[in-house]
Amino acid sequence: MKYKGIDIISLHDLDRSFLDYLMKKTKEVKEGKWQNACKGKIVASLFFEPSTRTKLSFDTAIALTGASVIGFSSAAASSTSKGESLSDTIKTIDQYADIIVMRHSVEGAARRAAEVANAPVINAGDGANQHPTQTFLDLFTIFELKERVDNLKIGLMGDLRFGRTIHSLVMALSFYNAELFLISPSILKLPSYYLDYLESKGIKYHELEDFTEVGNELDVLYCTRIQRERFADPVEYQKVANSYEISRDNIESLAKNTIILHPLPRVNEISPTVDDDPRARYFYQAKNGVYTRAALLGIVAGSIS
Ligand code: NCD
């Protein structure tokens, strides 16, 4: 019950013992324990920004735990489109729901919601900032497929500048002393805030542009799409739009046991022709989103302990 009622806003607020606990409970959920643990609870699912996997895997997780869902899947479908403030929308939904799950395009929106709501708020992505629940399923997948996270060599490739899944994952991996290979075009490098964070934690990292240089050393290659919607200037986007792709031509530069992960959606950074390579595990990874989110809902509801 230690984590009952906590908000899940940023990896910054969490620690290794929370992540280890969540991983343990996720495994139990995946093994079939805890079905209907949240029966009678109401979860508000507020997606002010588009989503496929995060929204639908939360919906599936809610069904698995026996809770009920209310909500909307676009800002246009909420009263913010009539000019209502985010705080007023959240204060109202707080009257109906036991847990609030929220995605929003503005960085810091989830934290603002947590300040005004009594119900626990789970950040399902706030702008280019953080996406903690994606990180939880990424970690769970690495634990399952590699049996540990400590001391792994992990490549993070793509839009390290705007990718919120990257920002959350970098922080989580620093709890496990992974060695990081930050692979991106130069204009999409990891922001200095996160580099400073890694340095403060004594985490070894290397910045490079081409994954084939280090592919045979990697335990995990975590690939991301370029976040087109976060570019102020479309010309800047075009400059990097096709700058990397995992394909049949270069996949053999990876080791035999490197796993390829991706939060999805992909655009052109992984060719579908490699989907049946045994190293490609991104759809398997997506399925783990259901178990991780079900465990998280149960933990913050105080129904799983
Ligand atoms: C990610 C997101 O929304 O940040 N998608 C997801 O939740 N699986 C990644 C992305 O949109 O590129």
Image (spheres, helix red, strand yellow):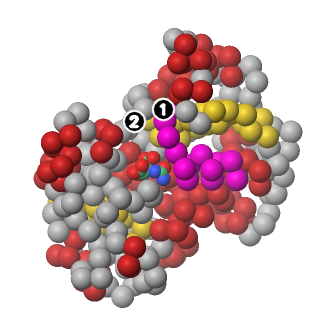
Determine crowd level at label 2: few under 14, some 14-19, many 20+ residues with C-alpha closer than 10 A. many
In the rendered image, residue 25, in percent from the top left (x then y), is placed at 68, 59
- Disc 2, disc 1: CB below 8 Å? yes
* Quarter holding residue 38: top right
Which amino acid is tagged 2?
Gly
* Quarter holding residue 151: bottom left
Residue that badge 2 annotates: 127
Tell me if the residue at label 1 has its CB under 8 Å from ligand 1: no
Q: Is residue 281 left or right of residue 195?
A: right
The residues bearing labels 2 and 1 have C-alpha atoms spaced at a distance of 6 Å
Is most of the magenta stretch helix, strand or loop? helix
Determine crowd level at label 1: few under 14, some 14-19, many 20+ residues with C-alpha closer than 10 A. many
Q: Is residue 1 left or right of residue 51?
A: right
In the rendered image, residue 26, in percent from the top left (x then y), is placed at 66, 60
Q: Looking at the image, which residue sits at the far right?
A: 40
Residue that badge 1 annotates: 104
As drawn, 43 above or below 265: above
Between 231 and 142, the one nearer to me in the picture: 231
In the rendered image, residue 172, in percent from the top left (x then y), is placed at 43, 53
In the rendered image, residue 158, in percent from the top left (x then y), is placed at 27, 58
The quarter of the picture where the N terminus appears is top right
Q: Is residue 20 visible?
A: no
Between 278 and 20, the one nearer to me in the picture: 278
Between 20 and 77, the one nearer to me in the picture: 77
Q: Residue sitting at 74 percent across and 69 percent down?
A: 31
Residue 50 among magenta residues:
yes
* Quarter holding residue 204: bottom left
Highlighted range, magenta: 48-60
